[in-house]
Amino acid sequence: MAERCLLITGGSGLLALNWACAMRDDWRVVLGTHRHRVSLRGATSRPLELDDADRLARQFAELSPDLVVHAAGLTSVDACEAEPAQARHVNAELARNVAAAAAARSIRLVHISTDHLFAGTRSGYREDDVPEPLNEYARSKLLAEEWVRQADPSALIVRTNFFGWGHARRQSFSDWILQALRAGQPVTMFDDVYFTPILADVLAEAAHRLVALSASGIVNIAGEERVSKYEFAMRLARAFGADPGLVRRGKLKDANLAAKRPTDMSLNSDKARALLEDEVGRLDDFLLSLRGQEGAGRRDELINAVSE
């Protein structure tokens, strides 16, 4: 078994599960959980007291991880809008606790942020662009970045938008699209909302390479291509041999969502590309890898990985 220990918070989430799959051959992976149990080959799960800074510090001392990836969070934009205090607690206060516990033991930390921090009036946001959060989710994630930097200046703060295989209790964006298309059901996707999606495994690998380079501060790790949600679904359909004719065009303004959302969340990954001396990757390659993961059993493995 690998000697290096990787601790991932939010252990029942799709990012943590896919990150664990990507790294389990090279790391001893511990998935930090809250209320769910996780059963995944090559990983162990451990309840973490993220709410209690002192207890969390003792748990870090006991587990002695070499690297912590903080992937826990409240990601429902509308739920955050309805409960801003809960959004601030889960997304910012818990992140501060994790960062303080990591800093106290000089443990390298990767904090997962979001691409949702800007007004969306243009494309290709860089790390030094001034955030303009439009909703409570974005505000809580921006506060998390500030508090993580204060508690642990050496932390790597990753802005991104990822996709990958989910589980029975929590479908991913790509899961939802594929399930509908394979059932012959049409899906309506926004053709006026843009992002730069990246496969979860590629995100994990890039983050680990940046940690090895002692990178810190804010770094965008996103796909090389800016695409609309509609185009993403069309290319996903083609990659998996589904009927792209089932993908219908829709507009964000017609969706009547509770929280205001940016129409352009695309990130510029020049900084990551320069540090890595390599491209982050392109969407069709990510989709080909996603299909390969299904063929290799990743989807089936993760479907029942999470239980009460």
Image: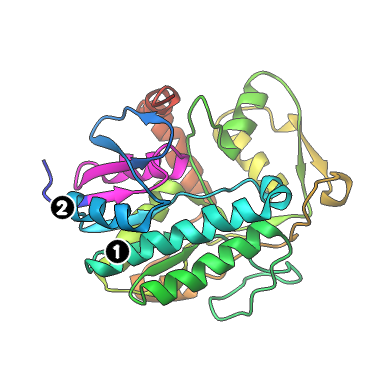
Q: Residue at x 69, y 67 (%)?
A: 133
The front one of 241 and 78 is 78
Identify which amino acid the numbered label 2 is placed on. Answer: Arg
Q: Residue at x 39, y 44 (%)?
A: 16
Q: Was residue 7 drawn as part of the magenta stretch in this picture? A: yes
Label pair 1/2, CB-CB below 8 angstroms: no
Q: Residue at x 66, y 18 (%)?
A: 183
Identify which amino acid the numbered label 1 is placed on. Answer: Ala
Question: In this figure, which residue is indicated by the disc labeled 2?
Answer: 4
Name of the residue lying farthest toward the top: 183
Q: CA distance from mark 1 to mark 2?
A: 16 Å
Name of the residue lying farthest toward the right: 254
Give SS at disc 1.
helix
Q: Quadrant of residue 294?
A: top left
Tell me the tag on residue 102: 1
Task: Specify start and end residues of the magenta stretch as a single range.
Answer: 6-31
Q: Was residue 283 drawn as part of the magenta stretch in this picture? A: no
Q: Position of residue 180 (x, y in %)?
A: 67, 25
Foreground mark, 1 or 2, reads 1
Q: Residue at x 29, y 69 (%)?
A: 103
How crowded is the residue under tag 2: few (<14 C-alpha within 10 Å), some, or many (20+)? some
Position of residue 64 relative to residue 268, above or below, is: above
Can I make out residue 206 in this image? no
Which quarter shows the N terminus? top left
Give SS at disc 2.
loop
Identify the mark nearer the N-term, 1 or 2: 2
